[in-house]
Image (cartoon, coloured by chain):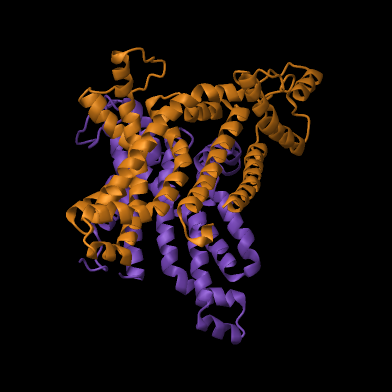
Chain colours: A purple, B orange
Amino acid sequence: MRSPRRPGPGVLLLGAAVALVLLGPSLWPMPHSAMDLDALNAPASLAHPMGTDQLGRDLVARLIAGGRVSLAVALAAALVGTGIGLAIGIAAGMSRRLDAPLMRLTDIFLCLPLLPLLLIAASLFRAPLAAALGPEAGIFTLITLSIGATSWMGTARVLRAEVRSLMQREFIAAARLAGIGPAQMVLHHILPNVASALSVSAALAAASAILMESALSFLGLGFPPDLPSWGRLIYEGTPHLGTYPGRALWPGAMIAATVIGITCLGDALRNLAAPR
Amino acid sequence: MRFHALRRLAMALPTLLVISVLIFALLELAPGDPMAQLPASIPEQVRADMRAALGLDRGAPVRYLLWLRQMLVVEPSVALDGLLGTNLATGSPRILSLQTRAPVMSLIAQRLPQTLVVVGLAYVIGTAAAVALGVWSAARQGTALDRAGTAIAAMGYGLPPYFTAAVLIYIFAIWLGWLPTVYDTTHRVTGWDSAAVQIRQMILPVAVLSLQTTAQITRYTRAAMLDALGQEYIRTARAKGLPRRRVLLDHALRNSWVATLTVIALGAPQVFAGAIITEQIFGVNGIGQLLIQSLHAGDLPVVQTVTMLIAVLIVLANLAADLIIARIDPRPEHA
């Protein structure tokens, strides 16, 4: 068996994708929206290692820029989603009064048709948020908030179960006898003990956020062309699949590598927390 | 058993009501006016009359109740009229599409068969493959075969459908040229040759959708099988000399059915939502494409009704999963 502390191939894959996206702009400083009108639809060359699109924009630069958007969405949406899930899970686990209504709410959210609702939100609230916050910040806020607000249910259920079993333990009773208030209790006794479960659900939430964002962008209801995400690049590349297959296949491969990497990271975190 | 079923049904109804309020509120909160596209030269009085004719002059709660009445009373009685030849629904306004002025339900009825054929077939194939793969890899736990199966399942989860579709289209439709890239819904099956064309054009969309289903369900089947295989009754069955195959299928699989069937029932409506993407790629003019087109055109009655329909399917699937468990699991807490 492999030692659980050594990263597996999936985690290395994720590391490579993240490194490419973070270090990319310094290694390949070409702006992603610069149009090289002498090289429309150019094949791979030294100036453009993956070629250019129909507007002469460099594909490597767009792939890196798309990765920054996709990973930023994943991070922000996972923070929002796990944040809501954490709050609801702890509240339901600690308070008997809140438990039943909060879990009913979770069940109802689990019954929602998420993709259609996200599509509705992304198409109807796009213009007002873009007007209020600026086109780029507006669409980013809209997508991260709506993905975050619909992805907390798994975290809430897992954390509720964890917190409920923690509340039976003796050190919690001791802390209660010592007169510690609920805020201190959560901060010093609950959070450290649910940290591993939380990190596993955060990893899963990030993976599904990437998939959800790219689905929205793929349907043309996500990011605009001057702020491309990987999903947007697939949307732009799919019509040219017959002539320039790389345009859709490379961003797709990056999404797949990142999501599989994050899932493996989640498994590795779970094994670290509870070695079999 | 009957009491349990009634209680679950009683819990499903409020859930559906809350979901319908949420969907209505989301569309209500969104800015945008169905009259915005009209020319500015229309006098204020005419504009107000048009708003009244569309029912837009009334408050949101009234319009919500009217929509609910259309969904619950008018549309079912139209369906009854069609079936039995009665005229229960004469004169009641139906839910109309803003784009085509046709009743939304007849738009849905036109689109549903295409979705059901592709999605339904993909789900059947996907679950069958998932159960086979799950049983197989659990029986050979830890071997290279098991690890390959688990890896395929993990890959299928991580590969988004638009990526697998792009790869499959590139390989089979463009590179090898064996299959068409686009699903032709006007194609009619009249004989063997046209049936062959129909099968060929269904292969890619069904493959993409069933790969996703397989990836999601295999993990649960394998886990449930491993759970069952670790039980004492398996050792007993082995010890009394039953062949491996019978132990696997009659004892382990039978006991892992509860978990597996739950996942299968719960996953069914989600595939409908997932089909939105697949329909868009292959040009299947099903429910998903109707939703996307209506969203782009701002046709809110269609969007509202299709979303609600998917929500109803999800709640029904939850109910079905509960009832199936209660039926096949003899332990008393479900009875």
Above or below, B80 against A115 in this view is: above
| Residue at the image point whose x is 39% and y is 51% from the top | B257
Residue A78 image offset from top left, x and y in percent: 46, 55
Query: Is residue B265 shown left or right of residue A66?
Result: right
Residue B229: image quadrant is bottom left
> Which residue, as the protein is rendered here, is positioned at the far front?
B240
Front residue of B210/B59: it is B210
* Number of residue marks: 0
| Residue at the image point whose x is 71% and y is 22% from the top | B89
> Which residue, as the protein is rendered here, is positioned at the far left?
B144
Say if residue B284 shows up in the picture: yes
Residue B69 image offset from top left, x and y in percent: 71, 33
> Which residue, as the protein is rendered here, is positioned at the far right?
B45
Above or below, B88 against A1 in this view is: above
Residue B213 image offset from top left, x and y in percent: 37, 42
Residue A252: image quadrant is top left
Front residue of A84/B195: it is B195
Query: Is residue B27 shown left or right of residue A237?
Result: right
Say if residue A150 shows up in the picture: no
| Residue at the image point whose x is 67% and y is 37% from the top | B28
The quadrant the C terminus of chain B occupies is bottom right
Residue A95 image offset from top left, x and y in percent: 62, 69
| Residue at the image point whose x is 56% and y is 40% from the top | B311
> Which residue, as the protein is rendered here, is positioned at the far top?
B190
Front residue of B319/B25: it is B319
